[in-house]
Image (spheres, helix red, strand yellow):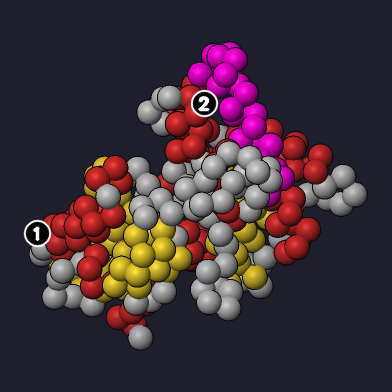
């Protein structure tokens, strides 16, 4: 079966797989992202993952490669990523294979997958909350990248001026309070799932960190709502797997922040953490169609 190879690079985990023409996942693998070892090691790990996925297998023949990465991205370069510290990495560095390679933004790729599955019709913000935070903006049913393709850096909206330091170099960013990586680091636990578990068990520090994360999300989303007036906000990424523990209080806090107008609908993504991987595959298929 014809397919493409795809990799979605997260701050903690890389998801890779083979994707059929309409976004059906034929194979899914996960590997740790060696972020602590520096940007060059991360790039090498991505390239190695792509090489393994691009090998022809029983009944499958990858035709192209799609790689979705965080930060500021153009079709030819990963310009900057606060999560990894890289700058101006060419697309070819992520995939040393004899196949067409398409580079895309991880969140906009996930938003494209949501759009393809019908979840992004109209004016919708797709907001994956994982190790980091960014947004994919859908306006009138089309993804909006902005003047330079960098729209949606919601994780770096300041929610507490002069607050906690952020990896981007600023202080008080949304990501410093509400990303899975930031919450886990503040509590000294392996991941956001541990934060949710401890908060549900009544651990006082976990309850405080979780409440601050929800409030920070509400502040940022209120700002976005007042500027862009979305019909809905779709929350994805690993943190969205907290389900009602996130969505219910977020709806309440957002409504509180928008007292003079109705808040947009807020719901969890149907594709969950696999949206970015599916989107990376769709990037590769689109490159073949072009």
In the image, residue 128 above or below residue 20: above
In 3D space, how far apart are the residues under numbered discs 1 and 2 (Cα atoms)? 41 Å
* Residue 230 figure quarter: bottom right
Q: Is residue 51 visible?
A: yes
Q: Secondary structure under badge 2?
A: helix
Q: Secondary structure under badge 1?
A: loop
* Residue 255 figure quarter: top right
Say left or right for 165 vs 247.
Answer: left
**Position in image of residue 247 (x %, y %):** 63, 38
**Which residue is under mark 1?**
58
In the image, residue 229 above or below residue 63: above
96 magenta-colored = no
Say left or right for 164 vs 227.
Answer: left
Q: Nearer the viewer, residue 197 or 70?
A: 70
**Which residue is under mark 2?**
196
* Disc nearer the start of the sequence (1/2): 1
**Position in image of residue 47 (x %, y %):** 19, 61
Q: Nearer the viewer, residue 111 or 33?
A: 33
**Position in image of residue 171 (x %, y %):** 59, 46
Magenta-highlighted residues: 198-220
Instruction: Give the number of callouts.
Output: 2
Q: Quadrant of the N terminus?
A: bottom left
State the residue at coordinates (48%, 64%): 108
Residue at the far bottom: name it: 290
Q: Classify mark 1: residues with Cα within 10 Å, few (<14), some (14-19) or many (20+).
A: few
State the residue at coordinates (73%, 64%): 228
205 magenta-colored = yes
């Amino acid at each position: 079966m014809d397919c493409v190879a795809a990799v979605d690079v997260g701050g903690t985990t890389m998801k890779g797989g083979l994707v059929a023409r309409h976004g059906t996942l034929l194979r899914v693998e996960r590997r740790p992202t060696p972020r602590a070892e520096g940007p060059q090691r991360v790039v090498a790990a991505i390239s190695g993952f792509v090489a393994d996925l691009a090998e022809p297998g029983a009944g499958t023949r990858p035709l192209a490669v799609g790689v979705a990465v965080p930060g500021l991205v153009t079709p030819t370069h990963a310009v900057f990523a606060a999560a990894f510290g890289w700058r101006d990495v060419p697309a070819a560095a992520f995939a040393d294979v004899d196949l067409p390679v398409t580079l895309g933004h991880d969140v906009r790729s996930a938003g494209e997958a949501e759009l393809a599955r019908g979840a992004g019709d109209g004016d919708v913000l797709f907001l994956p909350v994982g190790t980091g935070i960014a947004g994919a903006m859908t306006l009138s049913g089309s993804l909006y990248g902005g003047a330079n393709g960098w729209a949606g850096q919601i994780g770096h909206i300041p929610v507490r001026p002069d607050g906690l330091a952020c990896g981007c170099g600023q202080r008080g960013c949304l990501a410093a309070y509400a990303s899975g990586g930031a919450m886990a680091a503040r509590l000294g636990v392996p991941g956001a799932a541990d934060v949710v578990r401890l908060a549900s068990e009544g651990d006082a520090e976990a309850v405080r960190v979780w409440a601050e994360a929800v409030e920070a999300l509400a502040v940022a989303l209120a700002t976005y709502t007042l500027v862009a007036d979305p019909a809905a906000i779709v929350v994805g990424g690993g943190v969205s797997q907290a389900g009602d523990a996130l969505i219910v209080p977020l709806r309440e806090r957002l409504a509180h922040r928008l007292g003079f107008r109705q808040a947009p609908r807020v719901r969890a993504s149907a594709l969950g953490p696999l949206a970015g991987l599916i989107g990376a595959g769709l990037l590769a298929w689109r490159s073949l169609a072009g």
